Amino acid sequence: MSELVSLTRDGEIGIITVNNPPVNALSPGVPEGIAAAIKQVKTDDSLKGAVLIGAGKTFIAGADIREFGKITSGERKAGIDFLGVLLAIEDCPKPVVAAIHGTAFGGGLEVAMAFHYRVAVPSAQVGQPEVKLGLIPGAAGTQRLPRLAGVDKAVRMCADGNPVGAKEAFEYGIVDRIIEGDLLQGAIAFLREKIASGEKPPKTRERDDKLGDDASNVMAFIVAREQAMKTARGMMAPLAAIDAVEAATLYSFEEGCAREARLFKECLFSEQSKALIHVFFGEREVSKIPDIPRDTKMFEIKKAAVLGAGTMGGGIAMNYANAGIPVIVKETQQEALDRGMATIRKNYENSVKKGRFSREEMESRMALISPTLSYDGLEDVDIVTEAVFEGMELKKQVFAELDKICKPGAILASNTSTLNIDEIARATSRPEFVIGHHFFSPANVMRLLEMVRGRATNKEVIATSMALAKRLKKVGVLVGNCYGFVGNRMLHQYGREAQFLVEEGAKPQEVDGALYKLGMAMGPLAVGDLAGLDVGWRIRKEHKHLEKPGVRKPLLADRLCEMGRFGQKTGAGWYKYDENRKPIPDPEVEKLIEQIAAEAGIKRHAISEEEIIERTQYALINEGAKILEEGIALRAVDIDIIYVNGYGYPAWRGGPMWYADTIGLKKVYERVRQFNEEQGELWTPAPLLKKLAEEGKTFADYDKDNQ
Ligand code: 3H9
């Protein structure tokens, strides 16, 4: 057949094996190989049917995503008529079975649905995750899935892109049998039963028993559209996926496929899809550290400790428990410890209520968390994550203490969000074991984990930390040591501009509104109120010595804090809040803004949405370029992944650096230069931005050139 697809036999049964590591994607050659194998099964009289199976750890995990970029850039013509291949499978007069383990995703599920039957191991997952790449199923997935699973389930799976497990897939009618033992043998036995029964091989496309009627379907589509507009705000693919599934209920299979193809093409060539594919590969790229080979020795993490049971400490402890790692949580006061443990329990109870896991599972996770007021037990932990108050003196004391108590080889991690990790490390006799593990609030939810590499941090500690991030189901991104590292250093510039815009004439809700419209999960001022304005206030006091005289600094946040307006927790910050925590513009704040602007001699004027976007985004991008040039971030894509996973940046815009590329660096640089002329040194253009703009290059080019 080919190297990618082989046909072997077990008596009268053909076994078609796809062998395209690592995930058996449908790269060029794979669909052709399957088509050739099916043809042979059809024509070989000694074969009575066939099983399709994936070699290695999975069934087919979908189309080869790398090929999409080649098609949209014109480097490659669209390949084989894939829909035709699926029709040929379905029209095979002999019964054929897809045997699923690992993941049958996207094109993989579409292949499986063209087979007459599907069997799966209990751990298998099936799904149409294309929307997560800004696409829709493009090989009749939106037409065959509702015919197997019903409209309700199909529209949900295609619109939110979340997979379902084998058990659910069986209940939905996607999978015909769960195979408990050996998958291939189970699939062959299933097929022999079917052959013996003489049943005519069923064709999914000819079924209409699950397509419902207009009355029942109309509600499913209304709900799906409302849901998509809420949870995937700004994204076109989920709505297109819903349209395509709807077409299955309105038109013939052929016409439905034609509509799906049109919608698929629109999505494929969209900027949104390119951005989301950039994020997909970026999330995998960040785990590759040039000077740390994959075979670097790692330490075993069997037991952990967290210092501090506050919002961060509690959330971090939950991450360890969720990963099955026993964790000690240490506090200094009984009351704080009790409060922290109660919050952890409450968070878990919410998950149980939402059906995420059972009460027994919750109790077993709680049992992994041991609260304590002493350092007892810390002598044999493999890692300690410090999450005490953000103050250098306190952190140094804590690390000096840990140095005395912890065993040699234990990783000493700090959750600092801004402080100098080298200075913290110097408080110990083993700076090579000190690293920053910067979690994001709420730490049990947010996927980002910024790993801060100190000057002395050794490679094994970094490799272990990166692997640990994966185990904790986080996206670990390695960054260098500087004030605020990557995320918060950039955020500082972004927040600064948001405040300047308010001082200069924009209302808080106008600034937040424009950025929400851009796709940010929340505007920066509303985020400040959510996180607590006092947090930044405390950090600013800590770093007061770094302020440069004569350089403009935001005036409002400190004043709000002086008035006790810390944000949502005090019922007032940039906004005032009702009992449902809904932000309400506050005339008192507007008066304060006018007063402060007048005191500072700032002339207020109307500010356009465009200016809000440019000033906040270009501040992020300019700082990002400096960070890149200094080597604080390894690649531009690392910055994007940090922003998408830790700062609510819309993935469909690809992150700030990708967004800059889509605008064009020439334009970004030109505006940064103008702002620099108008506003002075805070807008000094990053030399790298200037260079790339002048060379007509992008940040993506920079990453490629520096591979
Ligand atoms: C589609 O099917 C459209 C159709 O409807 C239309 C057809 C016409 N292609 O994630 P991992 C690479 S759209 C190319 O670390 P895991 C990945 O980059 C597609 N490469 O492993 C990585 O490479 P590297 C719909 C792929 O075990 C390596 O494989 N399907 C693809 O944690 C290992 O990946 C999807 O969206 C791919 N399809 O998770 C599924 N998939 O080592 C996307 C992975 O060089 N994939 N790679 O960094 C996934 O969700 C996960 O990879 C999976 C495995 C769950 C399969």
Image (cartoon, grey):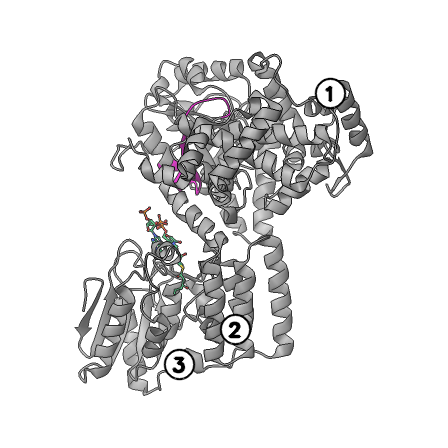
| Mark 1 → mark 3, Cα distance in angstroms | 71 Å
Asked if residue 330 is positioned above or below residue 127 in the image, the reply reads above
Residue closer to the observer: 134 or 164 = 134
Per the image, label 2 sits on a secondary structure element best described as: loop
> Does residue 424 show up?
yes
Labelled pair 2, 3 in contact (Cβ < 8 Å): no
What residue sits right under mark 3 in the picture? 203
Q: Label 1 belongs to which residue?
A: 562
Residue kind at label 2, given as amino acid type:
Gly
Give amino acid for label 3: Lys
- Residue 523 seen in the figure: no
Residue topped by disc 2: 150
**Image position, residue 703 (x, y; %):** 36, 38
Q: Nearer the viewer, residue 390 or 92?
A: 92
Q: Quadrant of the N terminus?
A: bottom left
Asked if the stretch drawn in magenta spans residue 478, the answer is yes
At x 30%, y 60%, the residue is: 27
Q: Along the polypeptide, which appears first: circle 2 or circle 3?
A: 2
Q: Which residues are magenta?
A: 467-484
Residue at the spot 37% in from the left edge and 28% down from the top edge: 382
Ligand 1 within 8 angstroms of badge 3 C-beta:
no
Mark 1 or mark 3, earlier in chain? 3
Residue 166 vertical placement versus 452 (above, below) = below
Q: Nearer the viewer, mark 1 or mark 2?
A: 1
State the image coordinates of residue 262 (x, y, percent, origin top left): 48, 68
Q: Secondary structure at mark 3?
A: loop
Of callouts 1 and 2, the N-terminal one: 2
Q: Quadrant of ligand 1?
A: bottom left
